[in-house]
Image (cartoon, grey):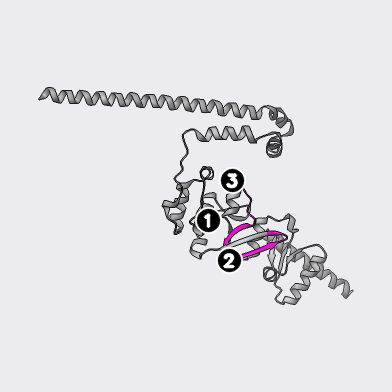
Amino acid sequence: MNTVSKQKNIRTSDGERFAKLAELDEDIFHLDDLGNLWNIRNKNTLRKTLSRYTHRGLIFRIYKSFYSIKKVSELDPYLLGIKALHCPAYVTCESILFKAGVLNQSPQAITLVSPVSKIFSISGRQYKSRQMQDGYLFNEIGVELINGVRQASLSRAVADILYFNPQKYFDAGSSKVVNWPEVKEIIKIVGYKVDPSRLPKYKFKKGDFLRDFRKFINNKVDERVLNDDLNTLLSYEEFTKIRKVLKREVLTLLKDEIARCNKVRQELKKELQESQKEIEDGKGKILKSFKDLR
């Protein structure tokens, strides 16, 4: 009777512990986190408890003193790296630049910034944390929370990489993607010691965006992209109806919009020329009047 009662109490205790985990709505934990959450002060007791849970498949050991309620393959790689550092950090620099298309080649490691400089790997995935001063690290300008992970915006990531490498070169192609006025503003607000004269002065030419966008769709968007990326937005029947004409209609729409913009531009140019002519004529009449007065 006592044995049955004891087993029942253990099962209840296990249930309560995992209920507390569920309330946190988090997937990754360090040993101390779990000890505090479950109020287990004895490290040996805590390790034995976790060993029992891992053998039962209730929790997964990532490495020593680092656990998850999911398999490593099911975890967000960005979140995993930040949690492994166990200190304030966010994803930035090369990882964000590659994600935004500024870099063509995928970086060898997921890049982060934190109070520590560290290179490490988890299950074959490489991570690189650059050390950043607290005053810069805790400045939230351009840092966003995306799916529970702190990530730099593209402009903040560019500002960050220039902080670590002021000589970093951005070619004209990558510069088209970057909002340089915003980068300069972030550098100023955060206080990075970056010489503004070193930043690219590239500007979009008029009409480039729509033409480039149309070219991108025409060259890159195929049936596979449509099927993979858009079929969840509509029901199967609705998607089937528009799939064959969607790309063509979008290209036609962009073509018409480019033509409209060009027409408006020509009209404005003509109006400007007429206004300039009227101004010159007015100046001529005024000068003539002055001469007549003399």
Instruction: Decide: is 219 above or below 34.
Output: above
Question: What is the number of the mark on residue 117?
Answer: 2
Q: CA distance from mark 1 to mark 2?
A: 15 Å
Q: Position of residue 108 (x, y in %)?
A: 65, 56
Name the residue beneath numbered marker 1.
Answer: 161
| Residue at 47% across, 38% down | 204
For residue 110, side relative to residue 154 (left or right): right
Q: Nearer the viewer, residue 200 or 256?
A: 200
Image quarter hosting the N terminus: bottom right
Q: What's the distance in space between the residues labelled 1 and 3, CA to CA?
A: 15 Å
Q: CA distance from mark 2 to mark 3?
A: 26 Å
The residue located at (67%, 71%) in the rendering is: 32
Q: Is residue 122 above or below residue 224?
A: below
> Circle 3 is placed at which residue position?
101
Residue 166: % across, % down: 48, 56
Q: Nearer the viewer, residue 220 or 245?
A: 220
Q: Earlier in the sequence, mark 2 or mark 3?
A: 3
Relative to residue 74, is residue 179 drawn left or right? left
State which region is magenta: 104-125
